[in-house]
Image (cartoon, rainbow, N blue to C red):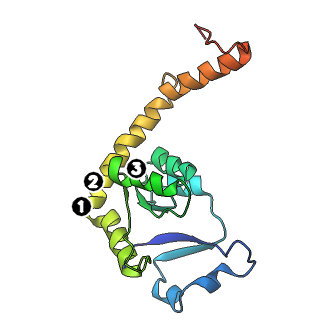
Amino acid sequence: MSHQQFLWVVRSGPQSNSNPFNYLPEGFLGRTKGRALLVPSWAPQIQVLGHRATGGFLNHCGWNSTLESILNGVPLISWPLHGDQKMVAVQLVEHLKIALRPIAGEDGLIRREEISKVVRGLMVGEEGLAVRNEMNVLKEAAKNAMSEEGSSTKSLELLVSQWKNRSGEPSLGT
């Protein structure tokens, strides 16, 4: 429906060893032939996010996946499931503006038309361009923070120094 190429890691339920492709809607593989690459169970997420062909990531809004996306500059579609993920989604969509979020219907379900609309919006729409631009700004900030003189590197060095000294006081000059 979105007419975008995609990679989808399809997993079975948590208590199931069955073929995860059995959970797909009837005719799905035929309708998406040539546009879809479906992978059962697992894929190397960091490598996928780092690939130049990756234009977006439908994400459950866990912090690890979110940070991996930011470090690779990959804009997000947020789909929070539980716990703090809903709060993270609000931050990503409304405050950082690096994600789009599908809207559930009155019954609480997100329809395929809505998913298609959000995917198209992210990949080829104006809102996707705005999200992509914000993500690039955040990616550069993260890159700077992790550089040799960056704030993350300095904070980690300070923590290691405190552990080494075991005094809890920062040691200057290290």
Could you say which quadrant of the image residue 10 lies in?
Answer: bottom right
| Residue 42 as seen in the image, left or right of residue 61 | right
Q: Measured along the vertical axis of the image, is residue 57 above or below residue 92?
A: below
- Going by the numbered disc 3, the residue's amino acid type is Gln
- Going by the numbered disc 1, the residue's amino acid type is Glu
- Disc tally is 3
In the foreground, 48 or 132: 132
**What's the CA distance linking mark 2 and mark 1?**
6 Å
Name the residue that disc number 3 marks.
91
Q: Is there any visible trace of residue 56 in the rendered image?
A: no
Percent x, y of residue 4: 39, 73
Asked if the residue at tag 1 contacts the one at tag 2, i.e. Cβ–Cβ closer than 8 Å, the answer is yes
Name the residue that disc number 2 marks.
130
Residue at screen point 34% across, 64% down:
123
**What's the CA distance linking mark 3 and mark 2?**
16 Å
| Dot 3 or dot 2, earlier in sequence | 3
**Mark 1 secondary-structure assignment:** helix
Percent x, y of residue 149: 49, 21
**What's the CA distance linking mark 1 and mark 3?**
20 Å
Picture disc at residue 126 = 1
Percent x, y of residue 63: 54, 49
Residue at screen point 33% across, 52% down:
94
Q: Is there any visible trace of residue 158 in the rendered image?
A: yes
Q: Measured along the vertical axis of the image, is residue 160 above or below residue 8?
A: above
**Mark 3 secondary-structure assignment:** helix
In the foreground, 149 or 167: 167
Asked if the residue at tag 3 contacts the one at tag 1, i.e. Cβ–Cβ closer than 8 Å, the answer is no
